[in-house]
Amino acid sequence: MENLMLNMKSIVWAVLVWTLLQWLVSEKLLRVRRRLPPGPTSLPVIGNLHNLTKKPHKALAELAKIHGPLMYLRFGLMDTVVVSSSEVARQVLQKKDAQLSNRTVPDCFRALNFDEYSMAMMPPVHRWRIVRKIANTLLFSSKTLDANQEIRMKKIKDLISYVGNCSQARVAVNVGQVAFDTSLSLLSNTFFSMNLADPGSELSREFKQLTWDISRDAAKPNLADLFPVFKSVDPQGIKRRMASHFKKLLDVFDVIIDKRLASHKDGALESCNDVLDALLKICQDNSEDFELRQVRHMLIDLFFAGSETTSSTLEWAMAELLHEPTKLKATQEELGRVVGRGNFVEEADFARLPYLRAVLSETFRLHPPLPFLLPRKASSDTEVHGFKIPKDSQVFVNTWAIGRDPDVWKNPNEFEPERFLNSEIDFKGNHFELLPFGSGRRICVGLPLAIRMLPLMLGNLLNFFEWKLEDGVKPEAMDMDDKFGMALQKATPVYAIPVDITI
């Protein structure tokens, strides 16, 4: 009897092994027949979910070292293609931009019909073009940004005043938080002619937590995306949580919009000459193509992207400089030569501050605001790099991996701003080695504001203060790890004590 049981177990195992081998062979044959990109072997049902970790940008970068810069994976029932090199990114974002500029919309972004009105999620059709045109001409044109320089400078002075008070009290500054405060204050003053939050305010902290909650939940693997049969039940509650996050933001915006609409006089808006006035005027003149619901969701796009990504980039730049004191000294020496220590850095100074610009470029390379560009969707079968991307596949561009490609960057994991001093590479979407804002028709509309605001904040924080790490932490002992979300945040916030050099 014992021998019979052993034989039965052996037979069962043999059948299982044979079935697995047959399945592996059939999968490889299917991949060849479909001309799919190479990639790791998937498992039944779950596909390649087992290949992911808590940090998918790093896990997929390691897989790309084995399978190449264009990989095919299957997450549940979803065909997925991952781009991990500048050469392939150029094909996807430039040569095949038209075929690959649609969006894979995660189920969580369907909460409150956000996907129907979000610039980031809408397909590139008529309404999307109208909204992009409004953003490019009304919000982020050179003329508009030049006109708002005074507002930005006032927010910078508020920032320096707040940090100066912390310096006098010898209190450590949460660098990411004050950067978020300044970004939020700038956006609210520009859009609404009002200040939603002062540096250090409780409302600003709540906004920052809310934007991180959105970033975190949006990045979680969602069964409703992987297996569409679960969409109606939302088994992880991600869509319900996202609806709650969006509602909190919309409630704030609705109060402001309703108050502005109530200020109508004789059928015309009382002019504040700000962005909200202009958007509401467009709604009146063009209600079919641009309606009030569009304005509400557009504000979510702008406040989420404008505050979260800007603050995380500023925090990473400060972290890298504190981690590398020689780079910090070089930046401050340049500021001293060009502007004079203790003087305000203005936008007109940027062209004369190549090392400061190089610090930001190097920060974008090592810590792109989005580790993956928002996923694109193939509108038809499309050939890239000699392989076929099947229709309806989602396409991830791993900007984190591209920025650390050893075939492009010498010492790719080291913070070396000097590599950009005599380089033509910039981060405006023209050079595919560096894609913090994306490229092509889906490039981030807020790029023109970000490239003004970031050097303004960083330059002034460095030019007015010396910085010491809290609790005597040595630079080499800093925790430089990240935490994964739609936006890539530092795992542990940077707390540093400012020393005012003007006193």
Image (cartoon, rainbow, N blue to C red):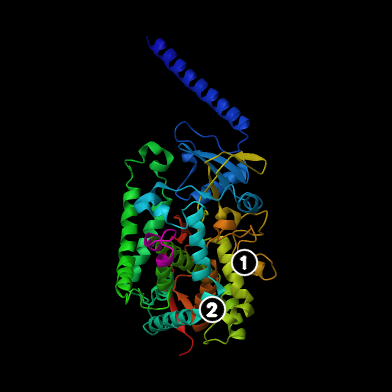
Q: How many marks?
A: 2
Tell me where residue 415 appears, x and y as whole percent: 59, 65
Residue 17 visible in the shown view? yes
CA neighbours of label 1 inside 10 A, class few (<14), some (14 to 19), many (20+): some
Mark yes or no: residue 476 visible. no
Q: Which residue is mark 1?
A: 416
Quadrant assignment, res 493: bottom left
Nearest the viewer among 145 and 183 is 145
Helix, strand, or loop for circle 2? helix
Amino acid on which the number 2 mark rests in the picture: Asp
Task: Give the camera-side residue of 253 and 40.
Answer: 253
Quarter of the figure that contains the C terminus = bottom left
Magenta region, residue range: 283-296
Image spot of residue 81 (x, y percent): 56, 43
Q: Are marks 1 and 2 in contact (CB under 8 Å)?
A: no
Asked whether 332 falls inside the magenta stretch, the response is no
Residue that label 2 marks: 146
**Does 474 appear above or below 95?**
below
Q: Farthest front residue?
A: 266
Q: Residue placed farthest to the bottom in the image?
A: 503
Residue at point 33% right, 45% down? 236
Which amino acid type corresponds to the residue marked 1 in the rendered image?
A: Glu
The residues bearing labels 1 and 2 have C-alpha atoms spaced at a distance of 32 Å
Q: Is residue 337 left or right of residue 453?
A: right
Q: Secondary structure at mark 1?
A: loop
Q: Nearest to the eye among marks 1 and 2: give it.
A: 2
Residue at the image position 62 percent from the left and 85 percent from the top: 337
Residue 289 shown in magenta: yes
Label 2 CA crowd tier, 10 Å (few <14, some 14–19, many 20+): few
